[in-house]
Amino acid sequence: MTLSKMTTAGQVDKAIALYRALLEKHSGEFSAEAVQMVLGQSELAGEQFSIFRRRVEMVSNFITRQVNVDRSRSPQEALKATGRVQYTNGEVVDAMPRGDENCQSDEGEVVFFKPDLSERSGYLSDDELEQEFEWRGLKPCDPISLSAINEADPAFADEKPHGTHWKDAKDNWCFAMFDRWSDGRRVSVNRDGFGWRGHWWFAGVRK
């Protein structure tokens, strides 16, 4: 990762202050003897820092896109507007989440991230993906908004194949994904709980 600016002394101070405030808030929950034993464990600081590092690295590879969504479109109209070859299940398309159905259009920001699957055999289940969204303070982007991004920037998915997921009324995982293959630019929407391979980026919105 190329650093545009180093961590500042003020940020270090804030991190320490946040942790100190948390310890003070919960100080009455632990015995002094047990705390002293934990403080004597040499691996404690390293474990705490590894959690901090992981969270910083998670947000270091964000890509953001502004989106302008026409909420008056049906799910099929939103997919058709992308101009992509469709591989879709009509039933799943019709039931796709539509975002804010109370407005005709809206603008916002969509955040794309790519999890590190080097220690997971290059595979991520949908349940694990949901946790990846949670760790980053995101929730999955609705497929109508994601379609709008691919309508505005068809080439984006050529190098950054991406998708989103949701559960249907029967608690089954469903997906919408955009990529390029031998048949050209395509969009796939279906019901599937088999998970994701390591080349995918995922679209989320801030909570």
Image (spheres, rainbow, N blue to C red):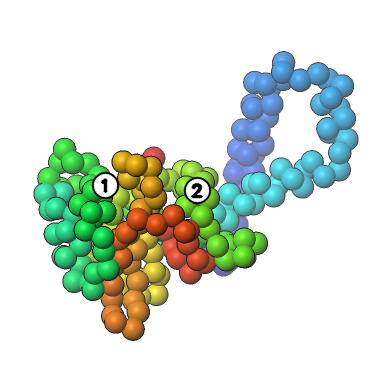
Residue 60 seen in the current view? no
The secondary structure type at the circle numbered 2 is helix
Residue found at the very far top of the displayed protein: 28
Mark 2 / mark 1, whichever is N-terminal: 1
Residue 84 figure quarter:
bottom left
Give the image location of residue 153, x and y in percent.
26, 69
Give the image location of residue 70, x and y in percent.
15, 53
| Quarter of the N terminus within the rendering | bottom right
Residue marked by disc 2: 127
Q: Is residue 8 above or below residue 162?
A: above
Alpha carbons under labels 2 and 1: distance apart: 18 Å
The secondary structure type at the circle numbered 1 is loop
Residue displayed at 26% across by 54% down: 92
Residue marked by disc 1: 97
Residue displayed at 14% across by 59% down: 77
Residue displayed at 69% across by 26% down: 23
Give the image location of residue 166, x and y in percent.
36, 48
Q: Amino acid at mark 1?
A: Pro
Residue 187 seen in the current view? yes
Q: Amino acid at mark 2?
A: Asp
